Image: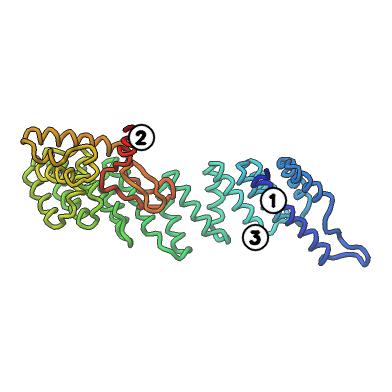
Amino acid sequence: MPTESTFLLAGLFLLLAAAGWALGRFGERDDEEAAPPLNIDYLKGLNFLLNEQTDQALEHFLAMVRVDDKTIETHFALGSLFRRRGEVDRAIRIHQNIIARPDLAAEQRDQALFSLAKDYLHAGLLDRAEKLFVRLAQGSRYQVQALENLCSIYEQEKEWEKAIDAGQKLQTLGGRSLALQIAHYYCELAEAAAADNNYTAARQYVKKAQAGRPRTMRGALTRAHIARESNDNKTAIRLYQRIIDEHTYLIAEALPEIVTTYESEKSTLGLDRALKSMLRKNPDMKSLVAYTAIVNNIGGIDIIDQCVEQYILDEPTLSEFVDLHQLSHADENTHAVALEKVRGALSKLASATPRYQCQECGFSSQRLLWQCPSCRNWETQRPASRVQFDTVLQHSITNP
């Protein structure tokens, strides 16, 4: 059965044939002699294709375009085909051969350099790709694409200062805002500085991250983390509470930090007051508090335990496994033991299922990833708000 490469090569053949026809029809000719629309090289290459001898056809066309100055676009097409087939070494050889031509026009040289840079990138040769993209970013017609690729390379290499520089240039040239992306670069630098206990530098980076619009939610969390790590607990608590007020779903990240901060100060009354105040402002947050407590094994705090109990009693799916009516009317000791068992089971289930999902591509993970590994977009993951029972229900159906 014909492969994708066969169809692509057939397209190349038609391109070559059309070029030969055009040269014969409209090109310079002697008075009585016209250039033939097709020559034996084309026919030989087509014969390889018809016999599905793809490799031989590739080598044949490669040898043919090396000696034909009028087929440089076919040369580029072949290089792209090699890259798509995963034969990057051949693509590199083709584009290097083009660059070596002494009579190459400046625009074609830039095209060859860009193609070669993509070959290196595809092969994982990031240093070589970076050098070529840096060159192309100096005013070529591939300047925007080169800067986009440089941002991607610097993200992989965690060269955040370089990523900021490339992102700012791209923002100027591309006519679109990269404020969120650049803010995350600054947050990466802030987190690295904080890890080295350089809190002064970390705060400066966060300030730069929060200077643009839209602001990154990561910047607020990073600022709060820095305050807690530098023992400024009062500021940390204030910032975490503000984060929850402004971005309710970030309770999954902020609530455990609030609990830990209050506990480090042995201020259970302060924690109780803060949580009750938060829930008075937003009663709908009770299920999120419960889910976060279940996932992070937060217990022994009255207001949180009440949220967890109500969450369990209100969860209709649990009625498949637990007699919730009997549970709610049991004596105090039985009630407490049963609730703890259900809670433990839910915690195990939550730890075995993805907690975050990208809103752009659906990629799931157990922890919050600020850049989605799949679609490479920034700040697109959102946490689950309830325990996922799909696995349990599927098990009960297949094993009645």
Which tag is nearer the camera, tag 2 or tag 1?
2
Mark 3 element type: helix
258 sits to left or right of 114: left
Which percent across, then down, holds residue 30?
Answer: 91, 65
Mark 2 element type: helix
- Give the distance between the C-alpha atoms of the residues marked 3 and 1, in whole angstroms: 12 Å
Q: Quadrant of the N terminus?
A: top right
Chosen colour scheme: rainbow
Q: What amino acid is at disc 3?
A: Glu
Quadrant of res 308: top left
Q: What amino acid is at disc 2?
A: Thr
What crowding class fits label 2: few (fewer than 14 Cα within 10 Å), some (14-19), or many (20 or more)? Answer: few
| Nearer to us in this view, 252 or 119 | 252
Circle 1 residue: 98
Residue 21 in sight from this viewpoint: yes
Q: Residue furthest right?
A: 32
Which percent across, then down, holds residue 200?
Answer: 25, 48
| Nearer to us in this view, 214 or 231 | 214
| Nearer to us in this view, 394 or 24 | 394
Q: Quadrant of the C terminus?
A: top left
Quadrant of res 315: top left
Circle 2 residue: 398
| Nearer to us in this view, 55 or 70 | 55
Mark nearer the N terminus (2 vs 3): 3
